[in-house]
Structure formats: C-alpha cells, structure tokens
Image (cartoon, grey):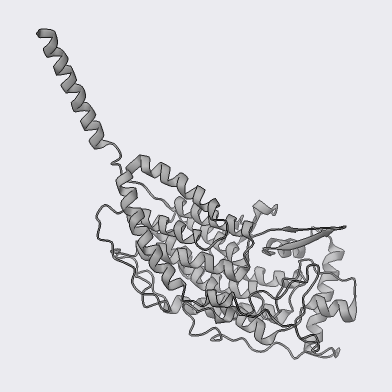
Amino acid sequence: MFKFTILNKGLILFLGLYTLQSCTKNTAPIEISSTHFYNSVDKVTKIMIHDIFSPPVASRIFVYPNIAAFEIIAQNNKNYNSLTGQLKGLTAIPKNKNPKVNLNLSAIIAHIELSKQLIFSEEMITTYRDSLYANWEKTNKEELEASKHYALEVAKHIKKWMATDNYIQTRTMSKFTVNSDDPSRWQPTPPAYMDGIEPHWSKIRTLVLDSSSQFKPKAPPVFSLEKNSEFYKQLMEVYNVRKDVTEKGDTSKEISIARFWDCNPYVSVTKGHLMFATKKITPGAHWIGITKIACKQNNYSFEETVYAYTKTSLGIFDAFISCWDEKYRSNLIRPETLINQYIDEDWKPILQTPPFPEYSSGHSVVSGSASTILTSIFGDNFQFDDDTETPYGLPIRTFTSFNQAASEAAISRLYGGIHYRAAIDEGLKQGKNVGGLVVQKVKMKN
C-alpha cells in the first residue's frame, strides 16, 4: 500500500510537471528585428537578379511589399502616419482585432508574401519563408498563426490595389516601333540589339506625382551633326572622354566610377560563337542597398527601417515613371549609334548601352530622387561606405553625403559612354524634383 501511494504521488508529480511544461511551451513572444527586414529585401533582390527584371519593373517589386509592411506597423503607432489617402488609390488596410497578433511579425510576413507574387521564381522565396516559419513556430505557434492570418489579409488588400496600377494592361501593349528614317531617333544598340524595354511605363499609375509628366525636363539639345551645334559638342564630349579614359588605363578614376555605378541587370557578352549574359542589380536596387547601409549605421529599429525603405522606394518608383515618360517622348538616339555611324565605327563605350532611348538618364533621375529622400531622413553630410557592389567584384567607395553619391552616379554615365551631358544634368534635376515632392507631400513620420 505504501509503495502504491508513493508511485501514485510520483505519477501525480510527473503529470503536473508535464501539464506545466505544456502550458508554458511555445509562449515566448517572437522577436522581429531590423535584420529580418534587411534579409527579406536582400532575398527578393537576389531573386530579381536571377529572374532579370528591368529597372522600372524592379522598382515596382520593391515598393508594394514595403508599403504593405509599413501600413501594418503604422497601426496604433503614434510615431507613424498611414499612407492611406496620401498615395493614389490606397484605401485603409483591414484593422487588426486580434490581441495575439504581433504586428512586426505580420509586417515581415506580408512583405514576403507580396514579394512572392511579384517575382517569377516563387519557389526560391517560398523556401526562404518556410525556413522562417519553422523557426517561429518553435517559439510561439499561436502567435505565428494569428500574425500570419492578419498578414495575408493585408497582402490581399494591397494586391487588389496594386492590380489597378495599369501594369497588367501594359503587358499586352504593342512593342516600341523604331523610326529608322529619322537619324535623331533611338535605334537598338549592340551587341544584343534588344527592343526598347517598357515603352508604356509612363502609363503606370504614379503614387505621389500628379502625373508622369509633372516634372518633364526641358528638351534635349536640338539634334544636329553640325560641328558648331550644342548637340554635336556633347556627342564629341562622349567620344573624347572615352578616348581619354582609355589612355589612362583600366585603373583610372573614371573607369572605376563607371563600373561601380553600372547597375545594368542584363549585360550580353559575346566570345567567339558563344553569347551569354552577366547579371547585376538595377539602379533602384543599388539605392535600396544604400538605404540598408544608412539604417544599419544609425542602428535603426525594425519600424524605423521599414519607414526608411518605404519612403525611399516611393521616390524610386515615381522617378522611373517620370524618366520613362521623357525617354519615349524625346526618343533620342544613343551616342554609341552616332559615333559608330559618323565618327568611328570601332568605338565602344565602357559600359554596355542599355536598350531604351537616351534622354533623360535613368540612373541620374533615380539617384536624384533617392538621395533627396535619404537626406531628408538621415541628414546632409552623412558619410557612408558603399559596399553594395562588392558581390560583383567591385571595391567599396566612400561618400560624404547622399548627394555626392548621386552626383557621382550621374556623371558615371558620361564616363561609361552611354549618355550625353544634358541627359545627366537634367536627369539629376528631374530626380531631385521627384524626391522633393515625396518629402513635401508624404507625411509618414510624426
């Protein structure tokens, strides 16, 4: 009898401990840090490089998931204002009513889920997402399920809004028609002679701009092959800069700058009978990388990081629409085509000429916009080491401010031999106007 009692007491003690452990297991809150957001955006960037998205389309892949994440963290947060009513057509996301939801966790999940719907290689992001889910489930399954449910609600809401931006319609619009009878008009360039990409991008709904032509730059110099004309002088500048750079050698400052800011997502390489492509980040992705550097340098929290990424991506997105509106309006021929036709048939630019019209310079417009927004967030004279291009074998470059980086990105197009000076100077002004409007009109932080 005595042994039986002890045994039962032991059994009772065992069952009690088991019950206690069952109650306490999986109840720790899931911690979400800025590193989670960095990693999520970096993963999407790598997939975009793999899938080879054009620069304008890449800007769209960045901005919508960022907006979804920001709208979630802006709920019930006195430091942030919702973008509802501030961005064209955006209505309020569903309100969270479940106290078990971790809003930061929902924000990162919504970012991942919406990104997955915008890229081609969905399995790559699905594998990444599932590995995160497995870890979070071990920590707190109930919190994960509640947060996931809410994140999917928000992602669905943003996707519905996103679907009205005319992107789907532009997929079926006609290809760009080359006017070979007019010597001033753009023509496909070697080595791939690709069609002009995204000729209808100006029809994409802007988020902050009144219209795609709101900051229409002044017209480029009048096309002329007269040696005293402004246009011909700018053409010869491109030609002569290339010659000067060649004499200095591959280690010259100009070549280093040109290659650092190349950011061409698809470069065709021909060796004998073999043609292959090298892949890199887009201009927008480079500035998203700079945003990460600034956030890390300032030890930004998760909420602050989402805010900085979102605001910068708004400016990049509208900058591409503004730039592409002008590109296919002026439809200006590239320096490489004219130099090969009229000056030197063996001349080649340092960088491969991208497949779209020349004016204005896309990198100049995007850099002007992004640098203006980042300056508004982090201040002027913000020194940073830009290691964005190290995965592509390029060294770190140090800048004393975002504006200095933007100016260098712009002039890199002249050093690279792919833009006239007017496209660079006017493009930078155009971009700063776009970024300035985002800073002026979009009030995200109190």
* Residue sitting at x 41%, y 60%: 304
Residue 194, x across and y down, in percent: 74, 71
Residue 386 is left or right of residue 85, and the answer is right
Report the quarter where the N terminus lies. top left
Q: Residue furthest front?
A: 172
Please provide percent x and percent y for residue 199. Answer: 64, 79
Residue 140 or residue 79, whichever sits in front: 140
- Residue at screen point 59% across, 59% down: 48
Res 372 visible: no
> Compared to 75, does 202 lie above or below?
below
Image check: 386 left or right of 132?
right
Residue 148 visible in image: yes
Expressed as whole percent of the image width and height from the top left, the position of residue 121 reads: 57, 56
Quarter of the figure with residue 267: bottom right
Position above or below: 39 against 11: below
The residue sitting at the left extreme is 1
- Quadrant of the rendering where the C terminus is positioned: bottom left
Name the one closer to the observer, 433 or 58: 58
Q: Position of residue 329 (x, y in %)?
A: 65, 86
Q: Quadrant of residue 12?
A: top left
In this rendered view, identify the residue nearer to me: 78 or 319: 319
Q: Residue at x 38, y 44 (%)?
A: 136
Q: How many numbered discs sit on the rendered protein?
A: 0
Left or right of 388, for residue 394 = right
